Amino acid sequence: MSQIPFHRLVYILFILSVLVSKPINPIQLELDEVLTIYGKDRVYYSLADSLTYYVQGPKVIDIHSRLAFPGLTKKIKPYKFKVVIDEVDSFIVSHHFKKDSDVFSRMHPRHSHTSSGIDVINIPKGIHRIDIIPLDRNLNINVRLIAKAFRKIKDIENLNPIAGNKDKLNHKVLKVRDKNIKYYSLAKNNKLFFNASGPSVIKIISRTTFDNDEKRGYYQFKIRENNKLISTHHMFSNISNGTSMRKSSLGVSQFRTTFITLSELDKNNEYEIEAIYPSNSDALFKLVQGK
Amino acid sequence: MRVFIIIFCLCTLFGNYSDSKDNIPIKSRLLVPIYLKYGLSLGYDDNVFRFSDSEKNNDDSYSYMGSSETYDSSIIKPTARVLYSPYLFKDKLTNFIFYFNLSSYNEIKDKSNQLYSIRFDYKVGPYNWFKIGYRSTKNNFLRYYTDQDMPGNKYAKCSYDSESIYFSYSFNFNRYGWSRIKFSKSNQFFNPSFTEFDLDILRASINHNYRYKTYSLSITAFKDIANNTSYKSGLNSSHFDRSYNTLGVNASIKKEMNQFLSYIKLGGSISERSYTSQDSSLDALHSKRSHIETSFFIQLSKKIKEKITVDLKYNFIYRDTNSDLDWFDGSFAQNFDIDALKSFKQNQILIKFSYDMEVDLFY
């Protein structure tokens, strides 16, 4: 028995996972902007005004954003916009990218576009509202939201990351009900690295910590693949009542999951996770790889 | 201007709109960003009248300087450039470039003049362009001369308006650089006192550019054939043919720098003009005359901010005139050695502040 049938199953699952990723539209449909990216048409929406989306969770939402600018511009500006979830949680997306020459807009020829910024949020069960609000109306930002389902993976193996600064990677043991689980701890701007090959799925389980009476917190981290930023993750999480940190009085949030899908073409990629926010508490990570 | 309107209409009507990338509404094709560049030059010219050394030292020269008290002057020169690049052809860049400047000579009001131009560029490929342009200048003041058609040998202001149309085509020679051939036709219409000098000038030039590391080299050879269009037009003064030919070459070298300066550029030119007429009995000043004009410039450029650039340019011109004849000036009842009279040196220094901006009103 070879592994061929198994491989086929993985490919089918991979293709299905791509197929079930679908763009979602805001209620402001008239702000559509079709961009031709590497020869394929993609519907973006212009952030000339606020965009409002309604999403049925649970879903992982990828917010793709690109800045449009006059084609002969010598210096590309950074851009920002605000994301508000259910009119309660909010964060600011901030990017500064280079020009992507393979993007063309039929509606606005003679404009160029930056590479795509991908900001990822996890949306829990139920119908949720996402507002995307421009912070500088002089900038022409186009966004596209993709909704993906959470995945179940099997044949799980732990990944052993290394620290970025040749130091030993700091780890914490969390007591989750009656289990002790090891998490890697990253302070702001600290990084951890690991290598992985496809076809497979990497599952990143993350939490934040609370050092006072906070009940809900926001944390942010970036993932780079072979030194190239692939996504920025924005997580909101409540404190977990059933979880505690050994030898520490810090509170621990409920976990959030992030997936990285590797195709058969991904061979020994180097991945990097960098904690970005908050500055006063650590983010905790546990990494597993599966099929 | 009509030529450019026709080009614009033809491009709009017959652009290749066959595939999906060209399925673009006409409004989107035309409502594109506009790029503006404003400039302000401040400078000094030490010999606006192009006086020879003997004229500079002769008090009689003041009698043909009009209201000016000096032959040098400070200069203020605002400029404006507009680049409009509508999407007329698939994957082909098309530009319409409008340019305007106003030169104001504070001490010599007669010299102040205006220039405007419009150019259409079509990019065939990398370093491969077709360009057609029109350029017009008003009030190109030379100096005060005696009007030979009027009695009394009184001095009158001599200036001309000029218009020219040109086209050029550049070729990409890849690692050997790129070249451009250019043809232009100009008309110079002198003011009513000096219509006998009206000219029709044909120019052909070939230019080659080569880049080596941070150095850019450029060399141009040109030939002018100037035809005196008012020759034998009926006036007394028009019995002399003032046609001439010019042959010249100019070259420059530019070094890109990423230090205090953005780049430094050095260049120079040499040209020889010979007047075709040999009949010295009618106009000794122009017969059998030729001159060699050499010039040299150095330009330093610095980017102060992303959109603000400062350029400092010094230009030196020396004209060496050759003539076997002397010229009798009726105003002063004396003979002048034409070699000494028409040779001159001129120094000019300009500092230019430029500001680039984009207008993206239609996104």
Image (cartoon, rainbow, N blue to C red):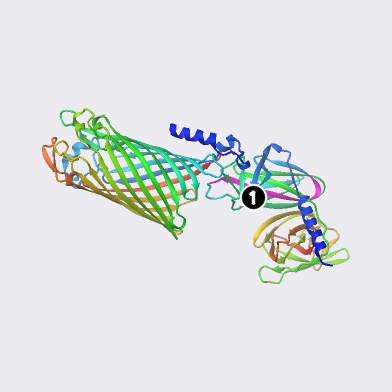
When asked about the image quadrant of residue B214, the answer is bottom left
Q: Is residue A59 magenta?
A: yes
Where is residue B28? Give x, y as percent. 59, 37
Q: Is residue A3 magenta?
A: no
On screen, residue A285 versus residue B192, left or right, reads: right
The N terminus of chain A: image quadrant: bottom right
Residue drawn at (33%, 51%) of the image? B250
Compare residues A25 and B15 and report the one nearer the observer: B15
The C terminus of chain A: image quadrant: bottom right
Compare residues B100 and A153 and report the one nearer the observer: A153
When asked about the image quadrant of residue B278, the answer is top left
SS type, badge 1: loop
Q: Amino acid at mark 1?
A: Tyr
Compare residues A202 and B212 and report the one nearer the observer: B212
Relative to B295, is B185 above or below? above
Residue extending furthest toward the right:
A178
Dominant secondary structure of the magenta stretch? strand
Which chain hosts label 1? A
Would you name the residue on which mark 1 appears? A38
Where is residue A133? Give x, y as percent. 68, 43
The answer, for residue B330, to whether it is visible in the render is yes
Residue range highlighted in magenta? A55-71
Where is residue A169? Give x, y as percent. 72, 69
